[in-house]
Image (cartoon, coloured by chain):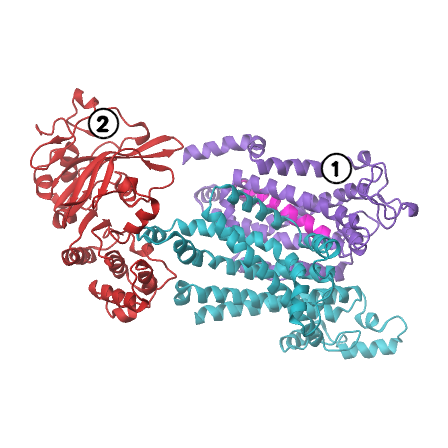
Amino acid sequence: MLMYSVKRLGLAVIIVSLAMLMLFSMIYLIPGDPAAVALGPRATEAMREALRIKMGLDQPVWVQFWNFFTNAWTGDLGNEVLSDRPVAEVVMEQLPYTLALIAGGISWSVALGIPLGCWAAVKRGSMPDRIVGILSVAVIAVPSFVVAIYALLIFAVTLRWLPAIGAGEPGDLGDQLVHLILPSLAVGLGWVGYIARMVRASMLEVLEAQHIRTARAFGLPENMITYRYALTIAILPTVTLLGVGIGQMLSSAVFAEIVFARPGVGKLVYDAILTRNYPLVTGAVLVTTVLFVLLNLIADLIVGALDPRVRSRF
Amino acid sequence: MTVLTIKDLNVTFSTEGGDLRALRDVSFEVPERRIVGIVGESGCGKSTLINAILGLLADNGRIDGGSILFEGQELTALSAPKMRDLRGQRISTVFQDPMGALNPVLSVGRQMQNIQYRSGLSRAEKDARSVDMLRLVRIPDPEHAWARYPHEFSGGMKQRIAIAMALMMEPALLIADEPTTALDATLEVATIELLQDLQQQIGCSVLFISHHLGVIAELCDDVVVMYAGEVVERGTTRQVFNTPRHPYSIRLLECDPARQAERTRNLPTIPGEIPDLRRRPQGCIFANRCDRKVAACDELPPDVAVGDGQVARCILAEAV
Amino acid sequence: MFAAASEDRRQWLKPLVRILREPLGALGIALVILMVGGAALADFLSAFEPNKISPRDRFQGPSLTHLLGTDQLGRDLFSRVLHGGRIALSVALFATAASLIIGIVLGLIAGYGPRWLDNLMILLFDSIKSFPTVMLALALVTLFGPSLTAVVVVVVLVNVPGYARIIRTQTLALKTSEFVTAAQSMGASTARILRHHIMPNVIGPLLILASMDIPVVIAIEAGMSFLGLGVRPPTPSWGAILNDGFTAIRDTPWIAIAGGLPIILTTLGFTFLGETLRDVFDPRLKARG
């Protein structure tokens, strides 16, 4: 287990480093002078030159990259252009909102996907199974921003059941949760489908296993076999799937945050691009990438912890 | 007294290529406290027979005709919940593959607890019983083994744990489906001795399925020879092994490597293949491979009693 | 085994029949034909110019004249949806073709090339995949500016790692197979081996996967246009219409409905079709999830 964790961690570090390299090259390749962009058209050449030196733009490329790289690993992502606050600080302010949104999305997808998939597997070949199958494919296909807009239109604008904008009153947990319902549905709905399909497929496989036959031969009740003997094994791949899915959920979160006017990293990046606040863009993209890699890592380790076979192998 | 009486049992599977008659007119008995062996090549219907007894036939399988009488109850007419109440309590099973027979994510103790869910014992009593059973099958350090997971045990230990689980509720009948095939020779002997021991202690009957003739001869009181879904011969072990009457039994015994008098390069085999049971031949099921085939073999052969309890499904049984 | 293989070959000859026999496949084909036909015949089906601004007709609800209503500039939404279909479908076609070509080339290089290059490319693919798609899009748009080119580049970056990986795995497996060794020993050139022995074996599953990815491509185009990172106004795009509708969602919901509906129908159509294609022709791919 320890060796395994170390190896996974090493891979994560390499991937994040490569991501940094890519982001740096991207920013470096952007046409135009960042100092000029930051200062606006009325700045003098001397002011620009001063800022260039302050930002390290006069140094050779590889020095610039090295500085970017080492600073980034120590958590220093530079200062954003508009208010000159540290990027890391600004991003960290917004991060909890995005994390809450993703947690909400995962809750939806797990709470609906696992029972649906399990039900479909137990009723294999029946009408409910077919309906769950078609619905899963359908919710996977429809893009999350369309779900977000339609959910807004139906539940917030037309029916007025749920609030349309914002993240709720700070400190009022209930209000915040109510504000989370629709955006997290938009983030998680597609994953209901993915998880239902995955759980169904792995349930069917597990139900064919010899130990399930043994359990039946011992006369154990069907419910116990389904939920305690089969489902506990069948949900293991789901955790890995969710780890990968978090990247997509981060994407969906950008849309959900914009549509529902929620604070969050996605909205932050979007606004930063519109205002050409490049350090903020780089920083926020980097943070989400690290977050994604980290959550993947956690998902893998959770699988390890849940499955006694994996637990002892490493 | 017999524990299990199977009479004229027929099982059919509906498949894409038509109906498959997996068992045809299968009859035999398992007397109290006796070990009955079933021999036959793979595909002879052993697994179907077990599943039919346990009420666990696949969805496309059905019993059409015959009876399975267990402790005076007609199993073919039993409701699913009643059947489930019997499994693991009165009829228990040990399967071939010890690696896959135990649930990988539940501890051994938890699985043993679950098997006793009908017993009405307290959790502590159930656990004490589980530890006793583990000790009985000679699992070292049973108090701690109880909390461990299946993958932490060797293949032989896993099979002993499976046996402990099967015998925990002191069933009247233990079905052992090739319980030693996946084990190596030394473990095989040890496991068989253990089974024999426990059978004596608990006093149950055993239906022992194997294609290993030596094991059957060693362990069993009675033998049932199956071929292509039919019982071609049955009798006491002594009868069947010493004076086999069905041509298939005769060939089967000839082909047993353990019985070769001298070392040969080529083991004798029975030429030909098991017939396609979706298109069963009209007459004797073994006719197409039989070296004594006569014209009358194109008719269905009767079960011929050839001695005290020995029966062979062959018109030539008396003459052989 | 052999019987099954020849049966498979016969099935390839009647693909349409087999797909149409599945209810979901028939529905998928119907939806795809509807959307493709609508896009192709856009000029005939609608009397209005998609970009014709008509201030007097602003914010009109659906009627017989304007089937889906009009937007904030008085443009006919039905016409814009049909023409938006052209954008969506041509981007889908072009970007998918580009991803396939690049994916195949990179996959063959990774699979057939030296070990270190293979490892390097796999690492690169993994790190591209470690960017969430939208973050990738946002970062790229800072580089290229909002445009259809940016959309295509994002699609290519999202799709290529997957395609290249499949080609690579297959190539690695085939590289050591008997018939390739035989061809090598007979002096066939690498290019010839790739073209005649390896490509035919990998192209089938790849095309099915690509067809299943088309809804994703359409979603990327619409999503980026929705964010204003894709097509420039006034070009009609479903995502752009959706954005117009989002801005005015409280008073004129039909604009958002008009923008979302074609996205839903098209992605569903292609998904149902792709699923059926896969189930019919290559059930093994199902393992991919």
Under circle 2, the secondary element is helix
Q: Nearer the viewer, residue C257 or C208?
A: C257
Q: Nearer the viewer, residue B243 or C113?
A: B243
Disc number placed over residue A299 in the picture, else none: none
Q: Is residue B297 left or right of residue A188?
A: left
- The residues colored magenta run C199-222
Mark closer to the observer (2, 1): 1
Quadrant (top left/top right/bottom left/bottom right) for the N terminus of chain A: bottom left
Q: Is residue A107 left or right of residue A282?
A: left
Question: Which amino acid, mark 2?
Answer: Asn
Which residue lies at the image location 77% right of the left edge and 44% below the top edge? C84
Under circle 1, the secondary element is helix
Q: Is residue C217 magenta?
A: yes
User: Dot 1 corresponds to which residue?
Assistant: C38
* Chain under disc 2: B
Q: Colour of chain A?
A: cyan
Chain identifier for the purple-coloured part of the image: C
Q: Is residue B12 left or right of residue C96?
A: left
User: Dot 2 corresponds to which residue?
Assistant: B288
x, y percentage for residue A74?
63, 78
Which residue lies at the image location 25% right of the left edge and 70% below the top edge? B141
In 3D space, how far apart are the residues under numbered discs 2 and 1 (Cα atoms)? Answer: 66 Å
Q: Colour of chain B?
A: red
